[in-house]
């Protein structure tokens, strides 16, 4: 296990650098936007009769820096605020801190995206194994066809279809926020039930859209492992089928982790559309609201948090990979 | 189940006492581009109890195919088209399937693979894989297998503790090949099939490993089939030799007899190719030309004729049948030799 910790530390440092890069990017983006929104806000407040001092305080609270200061000072201020988890104040939800908004939204996105990934990964892998093992039978062809079909539907179309089918034509699933508004959040059965009930459609959208890809990738990975010498050897050594399938599955899953890393980013990106379609108030929903209302602090904050989520998920995926493959550890 | 097995282990299945395994009229084909091509043709053999039988032939002659057929493990696109393989105490493996076959493989009959340096699961420690092997064959005390493996490792000058706790990628090619041999021996099989077991080893460790295999074989009276393309290895180790050419047995004799009186022109060329045996390196010469591919093996006449210096008209059309020599212990199939001696 000696290589595990250094690798993890390296990954975390890399993640921090990545987060800083994204933070810097949003900082400069706000400066590059025509009619600098920070400056505009300041002007707006001043013309509205607010004293310059108060206006400056408000703008600073909103963005974390002031437009008159030299750029490097602004930048340092901005990063400094971020490091203190202070992401400014929202414009859309006037006076509410962005950090507060995002912390509320984050669990829903993380839960739905992660469940979607796990469900599709597990079911896809099992399907792939079945397709590969029963290669010459009808069930294999049927599953391949089915997986290829699902793989071909774009996530957006799929989400629209699900929303149309199950909230309009046949409204068995609820539409909208992560839980019924009448319930108070907590570890109570009705609350958790309501959470799950509201999450079904978004999770299904994530899961179904990536399921076919997993099944097909796993199929070819299993077929390639089946041709490996050690699998023939395990058969000729009379290993029990259960043990052999374990050998095959572990070896075949490994190459899928690279794809998993890509998929995590893709799914979090997809949350922007999926949460919009299901009116599900998570990070993606926040981001699209921010964009719609030119709420730059909220936009920058959402970007940053989604980046952090993707990076953390990637570190976890990498960690699991390292735990399975001894060749990386030593 | 076990009652049935003990019953079987007492049975000889019609084999004469000195024979451990009988191969009769074995034909194996591979399906290539929709055509069934023969990789083994009418192979019949008696593998002797407690001896080392070497199978020698060039690349593509069907040696590995034979080893697989001996375990009824020829898999798609290949198949055993006809013929029987029968073991004393086990029965006819060519008629077995599924669980019955699985219990025999790796336990009563074990195989050291041609690519045995790649025969381990890369994600699991060697020791854990030995335990998997022991559990698969329902051994009452799986840990004892680790002890046995450790002993074998030490005999093959490996650091036993290190090997058992290693992953495959932490071992060198030569070490892995020795580990492959340990896997083949650790459950104390009755029959050991070894397919070019020492190809990844340098000449020195090759002969030391073969020496150890030989001594274990003697201790256990282990019936062994040793597949090789190296006549030097045959001379050092084997009790009997079977010469394979293009999927056919062309000669078989005890090692001493075969080396002293080779009868088939192909066998002679194999012996001449070994400088160690002729004594004078200048005399060593390799056989010219290439063996036929599966698709180009002639369907009639002698399979060796394209490269045979003694080729006659009859060789084109008529398959030479076996002639016996030396009180029936030596057989060969060649028109020229047959004519010379009759
Ligand atoms: N899966 C396969 N599909 C098609 N042809 C095959 C297959 N496996 C083996 N063959 C052919 O069968 C013939 C015998 O192969 P085999 O592997 O038994 O030879 P070998 O004597 O073991 O050779 P080598 O010394 O190279 O190991 C060869 O011509 C080979 O090309
Ligand atoms: S049968 Fe003919 S071709 Fe074949 S080995 Fe003998 S002499 Fe040569
Ligand atoms: Mg071979």
Image (cartoon, coloured by chain):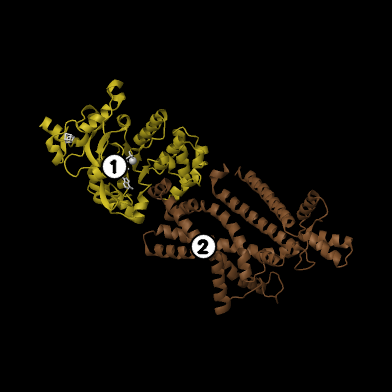
Chain colours: A brown, B yellow
Residue B152 visible in the current orientation:
yes
Tell me which chain the residue with mark 1 is part of: B
Query: Quadrant for ligand 3?
Result: top left
Q: Could you say which is closer to the camera, residue A226 or residue B33?
A: B33
Q: Position of residue B141 (x, y in %)?
A: 46, 48
Q: Secondary structure at mark 2?
A: helix
Q: As drawn, is B212 to the left or to the right of A214?
A: left
Q: Residues within 10 Å of mark 2 (few under 14, many from 20)?
A: many
Q: Residues within 10 Å of mark 1 (few under 14, many from 20)?
A: many
Whether the residue carrying mark 1 lies under 8 Å from ligand 1 is answered with yes
Residue A123 visible in the current orientation:
no
Marks 1 and 2 sit apart, C-alpha to C-alpha, by 44 Å
Q: Quadrant of residue B306?
A: top left
Q: Position of residue B211 (x, y in %)?
A: 38, 31
Whether the residue carrying mark 2 lies under 8 Å from ligand 1 is answered with no
Q: Quadrant of residue B152?
A: top left
Disc number lying in front (1 or 2): 2
Which residue, given by chain and number where applicable, does mark 2 sit on?
A: A211
């Amino acid at each position: 296990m000696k290589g595990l910790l250094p690798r993890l530390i390296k990954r975390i440092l890399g993640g921090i650098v990545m987060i800083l890069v994204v933070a810097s990017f949003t900082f400069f983006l706000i400066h590059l936007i025509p009619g600098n929104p920070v400056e505009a806000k300041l002007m707006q407040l001043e013309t509205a009769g607010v004293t310059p001092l108060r206006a400056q305080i408000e703008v600073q609270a909103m963005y974390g820096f002031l437009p008159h200061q030299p750029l490097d000072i602004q930048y340092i201020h901005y990063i400094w605020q971020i490091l203190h988890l202070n992401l400014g104040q929202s414009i859309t939800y006037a006076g509410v801190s962005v950090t507060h908004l995002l912390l509320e939204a984050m669990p829903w996105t993380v839960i739905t995206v992660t469940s979607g990934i796990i469900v599709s990964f597990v079911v896809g892998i099992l399907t792939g194994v079945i397709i590969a093992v029963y290669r010459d039978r009808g069930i294999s062809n049927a599953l391949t066809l089915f997986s290829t079909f699902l793989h071909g539907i774009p996530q957006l179309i799929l989400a629209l279809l699900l929303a149309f089918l199950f909230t309009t034509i046949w409204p068995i699933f609820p539409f909208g926020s992560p839980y019924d508004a009448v319930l108070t959040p907590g570890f109570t059965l009705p609350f958790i039930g309501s959470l799950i009930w509201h999450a079904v459609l978004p999770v299904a959208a994530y899961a179904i859209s990536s399921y076919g890809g997993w099944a097909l990738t796993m199929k070819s990975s299993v077929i390639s492992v089946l041709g490996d010498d050690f699998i023939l050897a395990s058969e000729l050594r009379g290993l029990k089928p259960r043990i052999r399938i374990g050998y095959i599955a572990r070896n075949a899953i490994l190459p899928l982790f690279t794809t998993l890393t890509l998929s995590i980013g893709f799914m979090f990106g997809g949350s922007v559309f999926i949460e919009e379609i299901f009116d599900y108030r998570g990070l993606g929903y926040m981001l699209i609201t921010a964009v719609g209302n030119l709420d730059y602090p909220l936009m920058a904050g959402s970007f940053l948090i989604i980046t952090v989520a993707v990076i953390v998920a990637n570190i976890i995926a990498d960690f699991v990979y390292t735990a399975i493959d001894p060749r990386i550890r030593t | 189940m076990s009652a049935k097995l003990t019953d079987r282990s007492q049975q000889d299945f019609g084999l004469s006492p000195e024979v451990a395994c009988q191969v009769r009229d074995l034909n194996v084909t591979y399906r290539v581009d929709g055509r069934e091509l023969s990789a083994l043709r009418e192979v019949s053999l008696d593998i002797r109890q407690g001896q080392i039988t070497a199978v020698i032939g060039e690349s593509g002659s069907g040696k590995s195919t034979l080893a697989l057929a001996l375990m009824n493990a020829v898999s798609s696109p290949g198949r055993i088209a006809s013929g029987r393989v029968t073991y004393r105490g086990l029965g006819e493996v060519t008629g077995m399937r599924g669980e019955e076959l699985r219990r025999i493989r790796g336990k009563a009959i074990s195989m050291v693979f041609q690519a045995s340096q790649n025969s381990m699961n890369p994600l699991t420690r060697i020791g854990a894989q030995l335990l998997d092997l022991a559990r698969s064959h329902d051994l009452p005390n799986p840990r004892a297998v680790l002890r046995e493996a450790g002993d074998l490792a030490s005999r093959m000058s490996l650091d036993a503790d290190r090997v058992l706790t290693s992953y495959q990628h932490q071992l060198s090619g030569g070490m892995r090949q020795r580990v492959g041999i340990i896997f083949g021996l650790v459950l104390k099989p009755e029959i050991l099939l070894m397919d070019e077991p020492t190809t990844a080893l340098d000449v020195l460790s090759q002969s030391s490993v073969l020496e150890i295999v030989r001594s274990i074989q003697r201790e256990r009276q282990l019936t062994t089939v040793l597949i090789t393309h190296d006549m030097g290895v045959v001379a050092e180790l084997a009790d009997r030799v079977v010469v394979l050419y293009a999927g056919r047995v062309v000669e078989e004799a005890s090692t001493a007899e075969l080396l002293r009186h080779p009868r088939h022109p192909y066998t002679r060329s194999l012996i001449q190719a070994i400088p160690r045996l002729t004594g004078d390196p200048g005399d060593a010469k390799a056989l010219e030309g290439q063996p036929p591919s599966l698709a180009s093996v002639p369907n009639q006449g002698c399979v060796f004729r394209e490269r045979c210096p003694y080729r006659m008209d009859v060789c084109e059309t008529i398959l030479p049948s076996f002639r016996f020599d030396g009180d029936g212990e030596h057989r060969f199939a060649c028109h020229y030799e047959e004519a010379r001696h009759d």
